[in-house]
Image (cartoon, grey):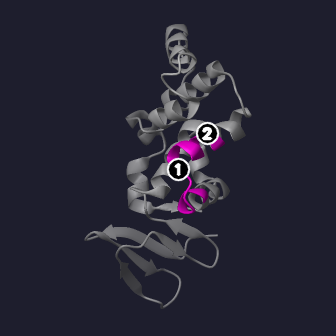
Amino acid sequence: SAKRYDLGVVNGGWAVRDTSGSDGSDLLYNVERLHFADHNVALDIAGHAGTTAKILGAVFGAAAVNNQAYVGIGLGLLDRGMSYQDLMQLALDVRLGAGASHQAVVQLLYTNVVGSAPPADALASLTGLLDSGAYTPSSLGVLAAETSLNATKINLVGLYQSGIEF
């Protein structure tokens, strides 16, 4: 169904305007979530909503940012106190199975963030960082999720303007 509202950033807040009726518009400040009858929007892209989007992009691919169920699960877990690294590990376990090989973790993260499979030297180097204990799968996942490449793939700048539906 078509959106019945317009949402935009105005003077450090969010302007929400009814486009289907006569409810007018509101200017909101310090609001993290909007709840509508048929969906919700998370506005805290600098907080849990952005973290969720970055994890989804790195682990499940950029299109997963549009999966409202996945976004809702990630937001719920972070809002209840789960750490970024713990949610990253959970996402890796869901995507690859618990105890996935270091090579599988590197291939997944590299492919989703860079957009192509890792070349042999990058695969060996990054797998070596996991094998040596310099990184854990979740800490490497957070590193990948925080890259500018991932931010571009998931359109993080656009999310700052629109929020993320869940």
Which SS class for mark 2?
helix
User: Toward the viewer: 82 or 119?
Assistant: 82
* Residue receiving disc 2: 89
Residue 89 in the image, given as x and y percentages of width and height: 61, 39
Magenta stretch encompasses residue 83: yes
Which of pointers 1 and 2 lies earlier in the amino acid sequence? Answer: 1
Residue 139 in the image, given as x and y percentages of width and height: 50, 34
Q: Looking at the rendering, in which quadrant would you find the N terminus?
A: bottom right
User: Toward the viewer: 73 or 3?
Assistant: 73
User: Toward the viewer: 132 or 115?
Assistant: 132
**Does residue 9 appear left or right of residue 32 in this picture?**
left
The circle drawn on residue 83 is 1
The residues colored magenta run: 77-90
- Location of residue 123 (image quadrant): top right
Residue at 37% x, 68% y is 8
Amino acid type for the residue under numbered disc 2: Gln
